[in-house]
């Protein structure tokens, strides 16, 4: 790794969903109408940072809104390994729907949400391993650069698990709000956390 890689992790803008559905890997749109929040966030991020996205629409829209707010960015690099946890057959349903339907896998999932995989999906533990490998690779590829990753709540938690050497269960305890900023620096073979879940005032 050449120099310090400064990771600027931004969770995408909020997804309007009064039913509280599980989005996971679904390609759903987000609400980018709060121009003041975007202006404040854009002012915190350095211009010209390497731009990474998960490939889902809500991340692409969020990055576009940051550019519209004045942040100068290069064309994005799509990194599917930074995508949200795959919730498999549960995607598109709400937790209340699953409880009402007496889903047979739900109880086991809530007993151990870090390592239990939703049916047809992946566990959060598997996701943290996927994201950690991607972060290490991208930190080498972009050593000494600022890296803006517009991603998902689960991705940010996985990045914190790597930086702080946390178990997946511990990482799930972090709150990651829409349009929040988390900053993690890759310094040689170690990590430094500058801020977590910073939102507009």
Image: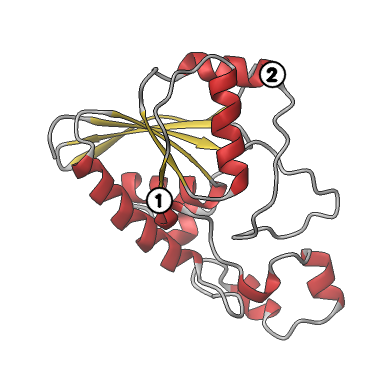
Q: Position of residue 143 (x, y in %)?
A: 19, 35
The answer to which quarter of the image holds residue 58 is: top right
**In front of the other: 4 or 58:** 58
Q: Residues within 10 Å of mark 2 (few under 14, many from 20)?
A: few
Q: Position of residue 76 (x, y in %)?
A: 42, 37
Q: Residue furthest bottom?
A: 104
Check whether the beta carbons of the residues at disc 2 and disc 1 lie within 8 A of each other.
no
Q: Residues within 10 Å of mark 1 (few under 14, many from 20)?
A: some
Alpha carbons under labels 2 and 1: distance apart: 26 Å
User: Which residue is drawn at the image coordinates 84% and 70% (left, top)?
Assistant: 97
Is 15 positioned to the left or the right of 174 in the image? right
Is 144 positioned to the left or the right of 160 in the image? left
- The residue to which callout 2 is attached is 35
Is 32 positioned to the left or the right of 66 in the image? right
Q: Position of residue 75 (x, y in %)?
A: 41, 33
- Indicate the secondary structure of the residue bearing disc 2: helix
**In front of the other: 81 or 195:** 81
Instruction: Name above or below for residue 152 compared with residue 47.
Output: below
Asked if residue 191 can be seen in this view, the reply is: yes
Asked if residue 176 can be seen in this view, the reply is: no
Q: Quadrant of the C terminus?
A: top right
Instruction: Name above or below for residue 29 compared with residue 183.
Output: below
User: Which residue is drawn at the image coordinates 69% and 71% (left, top)?
Assistant: 90
User: Which residue is drawn at the image coordinates 64% and 55% (left, top)?
Assistant: 27
- Indicate the secondary structure of the residue bearing disc 1: loop
Numbered mark located on residue 79 in the image: 1
Q: Quadrant of the N terminus?
A: top left
Q: Position of residue 176 (x, y in %)?
A: 58, 41
Q: Of callouts 2 and 1, which one flags the residue occurring earlier in the amino acid sequence?
A: 2
Q: How did the renderer colour the structure?
A: secondary structure
**In front of the other: 25 or 22:** 25
The answer to which quarter of the image holds residue 185 is: top left
């Amino acid at each position: 790794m050449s120099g310090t890689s400064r990771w600027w992790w931004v969770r995408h803008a909020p997804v309007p969903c009064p039913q509280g559905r599980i989005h996971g890997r679904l390609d759903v749109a987000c609400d980018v109408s709060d121009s003041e929040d975007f202006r404040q966030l854009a002012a915190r991020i350095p211009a010209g940072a390497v731009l990474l996205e998960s490939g889902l629409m809500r991340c692409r829209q969020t990055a576009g809104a940051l550019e519209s707010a004045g942040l100068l960015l290069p064309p994005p690099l799509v990194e599917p390994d930074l995508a949200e946890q795959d919730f498999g057959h549960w995607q598109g349903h709400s937790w209340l729907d699953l409880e009402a339907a007496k889903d047979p896998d739900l109880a086991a999932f809530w007993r151990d949400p870090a390592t239990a995989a939703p049916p047809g999906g992946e566990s959060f533990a598997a996701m943290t391993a996927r994201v950690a490998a991607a972060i290490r690779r991208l930190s080498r590829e972009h050593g000494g650069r600022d890296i803006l990753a517009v991603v998902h709540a689960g991705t940010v938690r996985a990045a914190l698990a790597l930086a702080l050497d946390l178990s997946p269960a511990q990482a799930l305890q972090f709150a990651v709000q829409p349009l929040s900023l988390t900053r993690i620096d890759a310094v040689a073979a170690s990590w430094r956390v500058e801020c977590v879940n910073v939102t507009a005032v």
